[in-house]
Image (cartoon, rainbow, N blue to C red):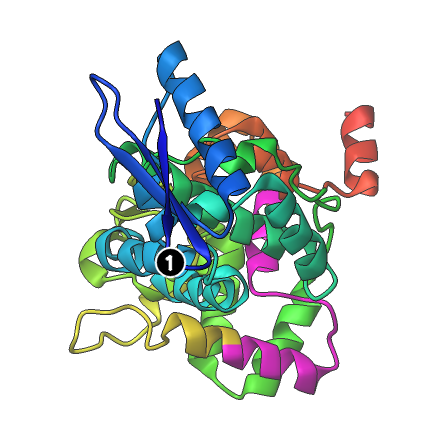
């Protein structure tokens, strides 16, 4: 049976002692609130479903995000973007305790954030929070009142995948605008291989076998190493490159490459083109050459056909030629 004591002029403390459970105490501003809390806790104890909420009530979302940043983030590859997410979410929701993070609160965040950025960015924010809640429950032993609250929140609907294709003429205009021969070679190499930005800029000569026409990628986005076959054009591009003292194939960092690409597109008068669209273009060209989905996925590293389909937009005129085949 709960005992409720008056603590000063404006506070009431509820205390519950029950065999098999640690003592539960909580202070409220009114006796009615204390009695309501005690009734819920005693009912859960009687049904054998009670879990202590004390830690989730005393831990703010900011505290949890800081711990995630220190313990979990160092194991992730894309730390920079996640740090930005953590800062933004801490500013918006950091003052709430984990116990106070409800589906309705998260739905409100989703809708308000959706007025500022695209649905994919909102989904990334919610996915980060979902991972945080799962870690808190499974690894930190923090019991959340409703479990992972994002299981009850609808994710934003994503638009159809981009269908932007890039022509060889556009690539030449971008390379010319940059005024860098190395940059032009990198653009052509990206379309020849379908490799990701990070995979390209981190290339080392020790990974490249020009005789076998392959490059070994030990670390990928999905943590599965793969070997990429090189076309004759890709081999020609690499063969013409000077060897750097540090063993790197290219001299660009990921951020500088994206910055240079965006500026060069602007100078060349080319709109709505991202560096990642070169991977999209490469994937589409692989299919247009007649490769089947298994062969294309072995090159690009896509895990499922659905993922592969997002990056693939075949030209109707080329498909028409195959029909006559």
Return the residue nearer the eye: 184 or 101. Answer: 101
Q: Quadrant of the C terminus?
A: top right
Q: Residues within 10 Å of mark 1 (few under 14, many from 20)?
A: few
Task: Please state if 111 lies on the left or on the right of 54 as rendered.
Answer: right
Residue 212 image position (x, y, % from top left): 27, 44
Chain part drawn in magenta: 259-284
Q: How many marks?
A: 1
Residue 210 image position (x, y, % from top left): 28, 53
Residue 48 image position (x, y, % from top left): 35, 13
Q: Quadrant of the N terminus?
A: top left
Task: Please state if 295 lies on the left or on the right of 115 as rendered.
Answer: left
Tell me the residue at 71%/51% (across/down). 162
Image-quadrant location for residue 202? bottom left
Is residue 227 visible in the rendered structure shown here? no
| Relative to 198, residue 130 above or below | above
| SS assignment at label 1 | loop
Return the residue nearer the eye: 282 or 122. Answer: 122
Is 274 in the magenta? yes
Return the residue nearer the eye: 99 or 306. Answer: 99
Residue 293 image position (x, y, % from top left): 55, 28
Is residue 91 visible in the rendered structure shown here? yes
Identify the residue under disc 1.
8
């Amino acid at each position: 049976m709960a005992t409720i004591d008056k603590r000063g002029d404006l506070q009431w403390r509820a205390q519950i002692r029950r065999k098999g459970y640690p003592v539960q105490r909580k202070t409220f501003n009114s006796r009615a609130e204390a009695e309501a809390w005690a009734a819920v806790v005693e009912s859960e104890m009687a049904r054998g479903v009670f879990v202590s909420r004390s830690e989730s009530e005393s831990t703010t979302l900011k505290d949890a995000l800081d711990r995630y940043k220190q313990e979990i983030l160092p194991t992730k590859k894309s730390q920079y973007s996640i740090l930005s997410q953590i800062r933004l979410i801490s500013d918006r929701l950091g003052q709430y305790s984990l116990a106070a993070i409800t589906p309705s609160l998260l739905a409100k965040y989703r809708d308000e954030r959706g007025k500022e950025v695209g649905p994919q960015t909102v989904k990334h924010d919610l996915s980060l929070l979902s991972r945080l809640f799962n870690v808190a429950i499974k690894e930190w032993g923090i019991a959340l009142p409703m479990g992972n609250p994002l299981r009850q929140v609808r994710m934003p609907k994503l638009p159809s995948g981009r269908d932007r294709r890039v022509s060889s003429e556009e690539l030449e205009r971008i390379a010319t605008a940059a005024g860098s021969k190395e940059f032009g070679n990198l653009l052509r190499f990206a379309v020849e291989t379908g490799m990701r930005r990070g995979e390209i800029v981190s290339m080392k000569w020790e990974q490249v076998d020009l005789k076998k026409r392959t490059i070994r990628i030990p670390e990928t986005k999905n943590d599965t190493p793969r070997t990429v076959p090189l076309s004759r054009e890709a081999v020609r591009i690499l063969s013409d490159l000077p060897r750097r003292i540090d063993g790197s194939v290219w001299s660009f960092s990921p951020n500088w490459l994206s910055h240079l690409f965006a500026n060069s597109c602007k100078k060349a008068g080319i709109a709505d083109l991202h560096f990642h669209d070169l991977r999209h273009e490469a994937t589409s060209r692989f299919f247009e050459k007649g490769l089947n989905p298994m062969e294309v996925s072995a090159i690009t590293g896509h895990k499922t056909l659905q993922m592969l389909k997002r990056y693939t937009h075949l030209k109707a005129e080329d498909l028409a030629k195959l029909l006559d085949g």
